[in-house]
Image: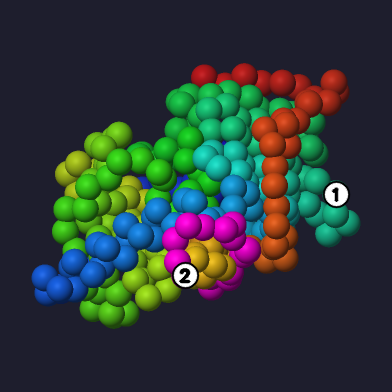
Amino acid sequence: MIFLLLPLFFVQGCARSVLQTYPASEQEIEAAVEAFNRYRLKSEEVCGCCLDAEADAALSVSGWFSDHTGKVTGYLQAMKPGYIKYAAINVLGQPLFIFLTNGSMFKSLNVFAEKAYIGSVHSEAYRKFAPPGFAPEYSYYWLTGRLPPEDIKILAVMRDREQGNFWLQIRHAESATESMVLFDPQKRIVLRHVLRDELGKHLMDVLYADHIPLPGKESKYPGSGNELCLVPARIIVSSNSDTRKIEVALYSFLAVSRFSTEDFHLEIPDNFEQLYVK
């Protein structure tokens, strides 16, 4: 496995294909769209730029003959739009591997093997681990359960059969993909995000749960506050009809975190073998 860290956050394949929906009334559609647009505007203005937490990640693979689960513990830091740093540690608190990206380039360090992999997030090697349609320049938004600040068009609104929330069918202006987003208009949070290609094939299915409030900034909008900065503490990514599942649990959040681009820069030790991927 080339990039030890990448499989913990990215999975390829076809996710759950059936979304349980039924028609919404015109009044419900109007209210849901208004709530979603307000949520996007307020969260972009009020919520902080960064995330700093401890993280447990588990990868489960189910097959005909056996099930396998791998777990790793570490520290996760992120900054919008696409900065991510994750350090996995052993029981003694020593780093096992480190992954960094600024949304365009990445570094993955295997501390035990003393090897460092370096390359573009658009390289063929990196894209083997990232699902089609995933935009690495917006990694922070995927991690925090928000949509990137890009132009979108809401094509349809439907009620969710199980939870009573709303599914929004969204077309992205900057790509050929579309999203099915399960939105809770009362709490103003995204509960699930299914990314699909132009033919409707599911590319990635992400569940967001156990949201916690983090302090926000002052806003010109009335009623703004911590509720606008609800961050998911549990993220589940599924693929291949649930044969592969990744679950990330975040905890011990720093209430206020602020980073710069320098915080996502790491000098590779001289004794490490540096491998540049294409």
Residue annotated with mark 1? 94
Identify the amino acid type marked 1: Gln
At x 57%, y 58%, the residue is 218
The magenta segment? 210-223
Q: Quadrant of residue 216?
A: bottom right
Which is more N-terminal, label 2 or label 1?
Answer: 1
Task: Give above or below for 43 relative to 30.
Answer: above
Front in this rendered view, residue 9 or 226: 226
Residue 18 shows in the view: no
Q: Quadrant of residue 23?
A: bottom left
Q: Element at badge 1?
A: loop
Residue annotated with mark 2? 223
The alpha-carbon separation of the residues under discs 1 and 2 comes to 44 Å
Q: Quadrant of residue 102?
A: top right
213 in magenta: yes
Q: How is the image coloured?
A: rainbow
Question: Given this view, does label 1 or label 2 mark the residue nearer the observer?
Answer: 2
Q: Element at badge 2?
A: loop
Q: Would you say the magenta stretch is mainly helix, strand or loop?
A: loop
Front in this rendered view, residue 105 or 81: 81
Quadrant into which the N terminus falls: top right
